[in-house]
């Protein structure tokens, strides 16, 4: 029956910024510490404590602005979003509301037919993360861990341009890859560094938009897919059985794979946003924005284009290499260090080398110390000193640092 | 009133070993511990201050004394003081002991000052009579000569700080001013009260009331003493994003400098519309006292004065409603138990906050609520901008502005029950606060009841040096201190 319906999806992605300290305090921005270890007086909301903006977060936002084709706003304002919760010590979250730092960007995602689709992004703004409430340690007490309080987040809000779970996963993974390339976010979804809220409504093709529901806080591609499929079917069933979808905030239950509405009390807030009087508006000059440009890392799609045009590597192979930033570091080091044909390096990399890495469950960056040996080996092959077959036999030993290619050849 | 001892004369006596740091402390401590006027929430005893007193005495003995060495100061109980209970005169913080020292009090400590204790104030600095304190009202040391048994208010919110200086339990004290909380009590207690330019003195470590208005400043016996304190506390602080890096002056140097050029003082006629002849006489006396100088007085008119108080009572409660959200009974302060989380919040905050604080949280929450924000808060911010512009327009014509500090003398404790009547006390001080300008209240004379009255002198941004020089001159000519 879902054939008659299409889904319309917008995504709010929360990306934790990769910084050494928090958005408005000097405590470390670290995951996995002992509870309440990374908390100072500011994070704990002690009387008289004041926020001071960590400028690195502005720089990371500007980089994101360049990478995702945003308008970088010269004037942005931090506001207070007021609500009570024990893991929110100040009684408000500092966020951007009326004047976000980034407006109107886009990201292009791949479609199954080989074309790309432009996903428009409405805005991205900086805000503080809250702490964590832990309710399942003790039957009588709740526990509060404030380590995450004040962690810098960039909330990236797309337009409802996504129309399938596949689209969402493509968008999310492309976003993740971009943010990792520009060193803005570590992309670790398991640790919550990247989380998504999915806004989904259904309609008949070409028909009017339906009422949307928001599924909160999804932190894996699997859950995103499951939640979307479930919520899609749920809304169809509601409508086809004569009901109407109520605008609601949903929770996704990872154990059952189902979505269910949050209690209305949990979200019916009037947040009373107003400009934070403890902070000045962020006013950027053209110089401040433009001086970030030279430090911009090459983006995934730019790398693909360069590999194809400069190195004559197939687009598909280029895509495999750029899938992880680490791969490109290894690849580009070998290309820069040797005069071996880059195309040759690429095919060995995605072939035998990746197979070896996968088999041994290695970190690609571990191979950085053997790049010279690898390219020496490839040179022996291309100079016809040894055959391709011998090269393949020697390669694992080279990758394990068991000797120089010359010596290993002699030993054979 | 007790004999007034200036900071410079005390520093000299300490230097010349006419008195020791311990003796000086004891002299003031003796009065403080009586706490006859309830000026203190906490008095620190000589034992607690033992090592500070010894170190200070040692510096005098070595001839290496610091600018405020050994000077006993009162500190409004809104400044967080490390390891010393800091309550904001509220039940909800009645058990709170900070593990940090506010920037401003740290500067005073760095300059050798010794704290006598924590001064009573209105709860979270919300009040104009020091009657909203959880620890009871402060009594003004001044008495109505026609009714000497009446207990009068010292003004507020820095009422304890003012009463403490007036009763002689400290040499000078620190207050905070949001809408007049230094200037008004200084006026009602016959003292000098300085609210510096917003951004001069760091707010770091001061329990926040309204962040865009709060500013620390001294309450002193003399203008010169105010300069001593301002020299210590007016510094850029990286940890307060609204702290200004405007260069600071040496406010003490050349404080008695003779006027070397003509100055113009504006007297806003709209401030004098509905005040008693006695208040108008304060302005006239001040004018007369300066007759021999090259000073021109001109009438000026503000277009925004009538809107200032309403604007203030939207912006200040809005910020307060958010600033006070952290007092929820969860991490520190007093918690009242409840069956669920909402009940803990409700019970702790209902029991922890007094009526005036509750009233302002409710007003603030209302003006920020969906559907009311545009009508109230946004509108108030626009009017605030007009008030700032209004001052700048007037400052194109004049160097300073002279106004009464308060519309009345000290009134009886319990007399003003209507909150709006109470808010009217700040009608002359609030516009300056909204504009972020420096203002100083100077004693200008006595009322028919023998109670002190004051005038307010307002300068342009960061003109504290010139403001203090002129104040010093007025003080000398009015000879009120003798």
Image (cartoon, helix red, strand yellow):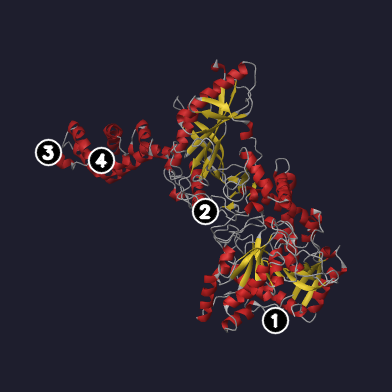
Residue A247 drawn at (x, y percent)? 63, 28
Residue where numbered disc 4 is placed: A340
Mark in the foreground, 3 or 4: 3
Label 4 Cα neighbours within 10 Å, binned few <14 / some 14-19 / many ≥20:
some
Residue B402 higher or lower than B341, as above or below: below
Could you tell me which secondary element the residue under label 1 belongs to? loop
What is the distance, in whole Å, between disc 1 and disc 2 at their CAs?
47 Å
Query: Foreground: B295 or B279?
Result: B279
Badge 1 and badge 2 both on one subunit:
no
What is the distance, in whole Å, between disc 3 and disc 1 at their CAs?
98 Å
Instruction: Say which chain tag 2 marks.
Output: A
Q: Name the residue at the left extreme.
A: A411
Residue where numbered disc 3 is placed: A411
Instruction: Say which chain tag 3 marks.
Output: A
Residue where numbered disc 2 is placed: A288
Residue where numbered disc 1 is placed: B258
* Residue drawn 83% across the image and 73% down it: B284
* Residue drawn 57% across the image and 55% down it: A49
What is the distance, in whole Å, between disc 2 and disc 3 at their CAs?
59 Å
Residue A234 drawn at (x, y percent)? 57, 21
What is the distance, in whole Å, between disc 3 and disc 4 at their CAs?
24 Å
Residue B165 drawn at (x, y percent)? 69, 70
Res. A388 image quadrant: top left
Mark in the foreground, 4 or 2: 2
User: Do the residues bearing badges 4 and 1 touch, measured as CB atoms within 8 Å?
Assistant: no
């Amino acid at each position: 029956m879902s054939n008659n319906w299409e889904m319309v999806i917008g995504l709010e992605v929360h990306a934790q910024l990769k910084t050494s300290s928090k958005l408005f305090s000097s405590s470390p921005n670290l995951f996995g510490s002992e509870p309440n270890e990374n908390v100072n007086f500011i994070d704990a909301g002690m009387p008289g404590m004041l926020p001071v903006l960590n400028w690195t977060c502005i720089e990371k936002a500007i980089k994101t602005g360049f990478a995702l084709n945003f308008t970088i706003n010269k004037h942005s304002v931090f506001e207070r979003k007021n609500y009570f919760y024990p893991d929110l010590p100040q009684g408000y979250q500092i966020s951007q509301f009326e004047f976000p730092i980034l407006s109107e960007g886009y990201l292009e995602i791949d479609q199954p037919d080989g074309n790309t689709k432009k996903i428009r992004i409405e805005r991205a703004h900086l805000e503080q993360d809250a702490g964590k409430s832990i309710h399942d340690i003790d039957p009588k007490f709740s526990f509060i861990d404030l380590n995450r309080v004040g962690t810098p987040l960039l909330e990236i809000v797309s337009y409802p341009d996504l129309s399938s779970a596949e689209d969402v996963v493509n968008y999310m993974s492309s976003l993740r890859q971009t943010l990792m390339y520009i060193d803005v976010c570590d992309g670790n979804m398991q640790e919550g560094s990247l989380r998504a809220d999915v806004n989904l409504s259904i309609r008949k093709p070409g028909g009017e938009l339906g009422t949307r529901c928001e599924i909160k806080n999804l932190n894996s591609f699997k859950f995103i897919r499951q939640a979307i499929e479930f919520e899609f079917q749920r809304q169809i069933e509601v409508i086809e059985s004569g009901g109407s979808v109520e605008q609601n905030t949903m929770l996704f239950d990872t154990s059952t794979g189902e979505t269910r509405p949050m209690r209305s009390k949990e979200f019916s807030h009037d947040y009373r946003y107003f400009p934070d009087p403890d902070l000045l508006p962020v006013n950027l000059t053209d110089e401040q924005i433009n001086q970030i440009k030279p430090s911009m890392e090459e983006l995934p799609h730019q790398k693909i284009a360069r590999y194809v045009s400069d190195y004559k590597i197939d687009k598909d192979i280029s895509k495999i290499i750029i899938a992880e930033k680490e791969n490109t570091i290894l690849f580009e080091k070998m290309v820069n260090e040797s005069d071996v044909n880059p195309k040759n390096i690429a095919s060995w990399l995605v072939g035998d080398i990746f197979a070896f890495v996968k088999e041994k469950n290695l970190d690609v960056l571990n191979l950085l110390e053997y790049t010279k040996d690898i390219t020496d080996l490839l040179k022996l092959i291309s100079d016809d000193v040894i055959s391709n077959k011998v090269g393949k036999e020697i390669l694992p030993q080279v990758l394990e640092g068991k000797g120089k290619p010359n010596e290993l050849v002699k030993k054979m | 009133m007790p004999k007034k001892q200036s900071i410079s004369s005390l520093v000299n006596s300490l230097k010349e070993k006419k008195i020791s740091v311990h003796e000086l402390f004891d002299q003031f401590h003796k009065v403080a511990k009586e706490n006859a006027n309830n000026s203190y929430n906490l008095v620190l005893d000589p034992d607690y201050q033992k090592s500070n007193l010894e170190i200070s005495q040692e510096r005098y003995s070595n001839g290496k004394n610091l600018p405020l060495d050994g000077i006993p100061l009162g500190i409004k109980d809104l400044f967080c003081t490390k390891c010393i209970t800091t309550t904001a005169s509220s039940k909800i913080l009645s058990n709170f002991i900070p593990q940090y020292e506010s920037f401003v009090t740290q500067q005073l400590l760095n300059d050798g000052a010794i704290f006598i204790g924590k001064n009573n104030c209105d709860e979270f600095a919300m009040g104009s009579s020091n009657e909203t304190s959880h620890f009871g009202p402060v009594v003004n040391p001044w008495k109505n000569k026609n009714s000497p048994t009446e207990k009068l208010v010292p003004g507020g919110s820095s009422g304890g700080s003012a009463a403490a200086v007036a009763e002689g339990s400290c040499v000078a004290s620190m207050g905070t001013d949001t809408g007049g909380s230094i200037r008004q009590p200084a006026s009602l207690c016959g003292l000098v009260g300085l609210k510096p330019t917003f951004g001069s003195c760091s707010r770091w470590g001061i329990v926040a009331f309204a962040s865009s208005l709060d500013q620390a400043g001294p309450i002193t016996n003399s203008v010169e003493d105010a300069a001593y304190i301002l020299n210590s506390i007016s510094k850029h602080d990286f940890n307060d994003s609204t702290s200004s890096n405007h260069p600071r002056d040496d406010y003490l140097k050349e404080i008695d400098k003779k006027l070397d050029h003509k100055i113009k003082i504006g007297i806003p006629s709209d401030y004098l519309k509905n005040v008693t002849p006695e208040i108008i006489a304060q302005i006239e006396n001040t004018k007369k006292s300066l007759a021999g100088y090259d000073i021109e007085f001109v009438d000026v008119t503000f277009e925004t004065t009538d809107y200032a108080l309403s604007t203030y009572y939207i912006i200040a409660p809005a910020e307060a409603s958010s600033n006070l959200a952290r007092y929820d009974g969860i991490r520190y302060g007093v918690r009242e138990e409840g069956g669920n989380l909402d009940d803990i919040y409700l019970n702790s905050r209902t029991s922890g906050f007094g009526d005036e604080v509750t009233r302002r949280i409710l007003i603030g929450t209302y003006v920020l609520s969906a559907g009311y924000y545009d009508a109230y808060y946004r509108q108030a911010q626009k009017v605030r901008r007009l008030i700032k512009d209004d001052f700048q327009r007037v400052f194109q014509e004049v160097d300073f502005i002279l106004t009464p500090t308060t519309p009345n003398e000290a009134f009886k404790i319990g007399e003003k029950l209507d909150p709006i009547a109470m808010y009217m006390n700040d009608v002359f001080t609030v516009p300056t606060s909204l504009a972020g300008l420096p203002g100083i209240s100077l004693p200008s004379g006595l009322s028919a009841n023998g109670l002190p009255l004051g005038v307010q002198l307002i300068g342009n941004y960061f003109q504290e040096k010139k403001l203090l020089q002129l104040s010093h001159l007025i003080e000398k000519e009015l000879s009120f201190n003798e």
